[in-house]
Image: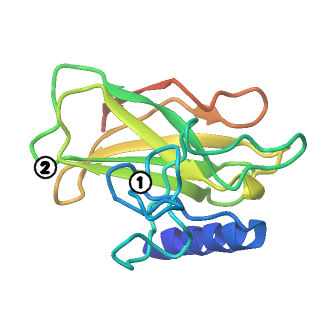
Amino acid sequence: MRFRLVSLLLILILVLTACGEPAYPAPGHGGAGAEGAPATEDEPAPAGGDETGQATVELTPTAESEPAPAAGEVPAIASVTGTVTYSGEAAPPAGAVLSVQIEDVSRADAPAVVIGEQTVSDLASPPYSFEVIYVPAVIEESGSYALRVRITDAAGALLFTNTASVPVITHGSPTANIEVVVDPA
């Protein structure tokens, strides 16, 4: 799993480097603007890090911070957003972990490939919001992509999962305001 996440991050860094895009700090993580003043959500930090000299690795695209790509141009990063709720009366215990993955499910004869993932620890009350970052350059328009949602306990035992396919990104499928219901495992 870590290998896939590291691979995704390396691909993202390569794409950003090739496109000449700066890394954007997540809101609340500081960063310096062009004049040395603290960055805002509308003003990205310079590539390479924030005012402390530490590298900026979190990327959080928002409508305010990401410039719109030119016609025919693929953005460097994009996201799939929505909420997760569960069916039934049983609630996840304290320390439960939510994992939302975007998977390439195009090939029936091969395991799904994870192209983006978000993990949320110590869940509060539902619904649980998610934003999964992915690199559009790896998306094939003829491909099929779906969400896999899991809630596990602190030890990793599966408690809830989505039992219905949740298509995203291609073939007219949504990328925002997606509602996923997970069922007890």
Q: Residue 89 versus residue 10: which sits nearer the camera? A: 10
Q: Residue at x 74, y 58 (%)?
A: 138
Judged from this view, the residue extending furthest toward the right is 72
Judged from this view, the residue extending furthest toward the left is 94
Q: Is residue 24 left or right of residue 139?
A: left
Locate residue 151, reporting x and y percent.
Answer: 29, 43
Q: Earlier in the sequence, mark 2 or mark 1?
A: 1
Amino acid at circle 1: Ala
Q: Residue 5 versus residue 73: which sits nearer the camera? A: 73
Q: Residue 16 versus residue 130: which sits nearer the camera? A: 16
Q: Which mark is residue 185?
A: none
Crowd tier of the residue under label 2, counting other residues whose Cα lies within 10 Å: few below 14, some 14–19, many 20 or above: some
The residue carrying mark 2 is 95
Q: Residue at x 55, y 70 (%)?
A: 9
Locate residue 118, reporting x and y percent.
Answer: 42, 51
Q: Secondary structure at mark 2?
A: loop
Up-down relation of residue 114 to residue 164 (above or below): below
Amino acid at circle 2: Gly
Between disc 2 and disc 1, the foreground one is: 1
The residue carrying mark 1 is 26
Q: How many marks?
A: 2
Q: Secondary structure at mark 1?
A: loop
Q: Residue at x 76, y 72 (%)?
A: 18
Which quarter of the rendering shows the N terminus? Answer: bottom left
Q: Is residue 7 left or right of residue 149?
A: right
The Cα atoms of the two marked residues, 2 and 1, are separated by: 24 Å
Locate residue 126, reporting x and y percent.
Answer: 25, 26
Judged from this view, the residue extending furthest toward the front is 35
Q: Residue at x 44, y 59 (%)?
A: 25
Up-down relation of residue 70 to residue 164 (above or below): below
